[in-house]
Amino acid sequence: MEINYNMKETIACIGDSITFGSGVLSPKKNSYPAILGRLLGERYEIFNYGLPGRTALRSGDQPYAEEREYRKSLERKASTYIIMLGTNDSKTFNWKEDEYPKDLEELVRTYKDLPNVPKILLMKPPKAFPVLGGIIRYDIQDSIIRHEICEDVGTIATKYNFDVVDLYHLTKDHPEWFVDGVHPNKEGNQAIAQRIKTFL
C-alpha cells in the first residue's frame, strides 16, 4: 500500500478564553494553538475551537457543549483533541463539585468515542494569580482549580489512560506570564505550546 506523506495530522484545541488566546493582541498568531502549529511544522494542521467564558459544567453560565464550535470540533474528526475546560467552572457562581467531573467526563467521551479514534490530551488549567488588591479577577477561585479541578482532570485521564499536561504546575511560579492573572501573555502561550509539544 502506498503511503501518502502529504496527509497532515490534525489537532483540535478545545477550551475557553485561555485556548482562544484572549491574553494576546493577535490570537490567530500568538495563542498557544497558533504557536504550537509553528513549533510542529507543516505536517500538522491546528484548529482552535476555544471560546471565551465557556464551561464544562452543563449548569454553568456558558456551557461549551451548547455551542456551535463544539459541534464543529466534533465534525472535524481530528487526529488529536487537546481539551481544557475548568477555569470558568471555578467561578463562585458556577462551581458545583459533584457535577463538574461528570460533565467534563461526558464531554471528553464525545471526542473519545468518535469513529476515527483520536488521541486525547487533557490539560489541567493554569494557576490563577491575584492582581492589584490581592483579588483574582472574574470571580475565579484558584483554590478550586488547584484542589478540585486539577484532581478531577487527573482522575478522568487515569480512567481512560489519557496523557495529561499539567499547566498548573508549569505556571505556578510565573505570574509574569499573565496579563491579568488569568490569561497568558505571549510568553505564557509560548511556554504552554512548548510543553504540549513534548506530548505529541
Image (cartoon, rainbow, N blue to C red):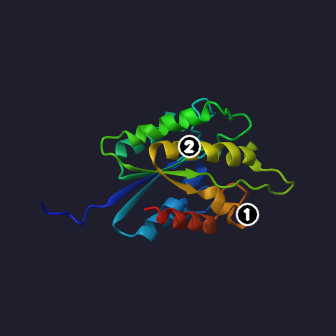
Name the quadrant of the N terminus: bottom left
Q: State left or right for residue 63 relative to residue 7.
A: right
Secondary structure, mark 1, is helix
Residue 158, image x and y in percent?
Answer: 51, 46
Q: Which quadrant of the structure image shows residue 191?
A: bottom right
The amino acid sitting under disc 1 is: Pro
From the image, which quarter does the C terminus lie in?
Answer: bottom left
**Amino acid type indicated by mark 2:** Thr
* Secondary structure beneath label 2: helix
Residue annotated with mark 2: 155
Quick one: label 1, few (<14), some, or many (20+) residues within 10 Å?
A: some
Q: Nearer the viewer, mark 1 or mark 2?
A: 2
Residue 2 x %, y %: 13, 63
Measured as percent of width and height from the top left, residue 79 is found at: 35, 53
Residue 141 in sight in this render: no
Residue under the point 48% across and 37% down: 107
Q: Name the one closer to the observer, 79 or 102.
A: 102
Q: Is residue 112 above or below residue 121?
A: above
Crowding around mark 2 (Cα neighbors within 10 Å: few <14, some 14 to 19, many 20+) is some
Disc sitting over residue 175 in the figure: 1
* Location of residue 56 (image quadrant): top right
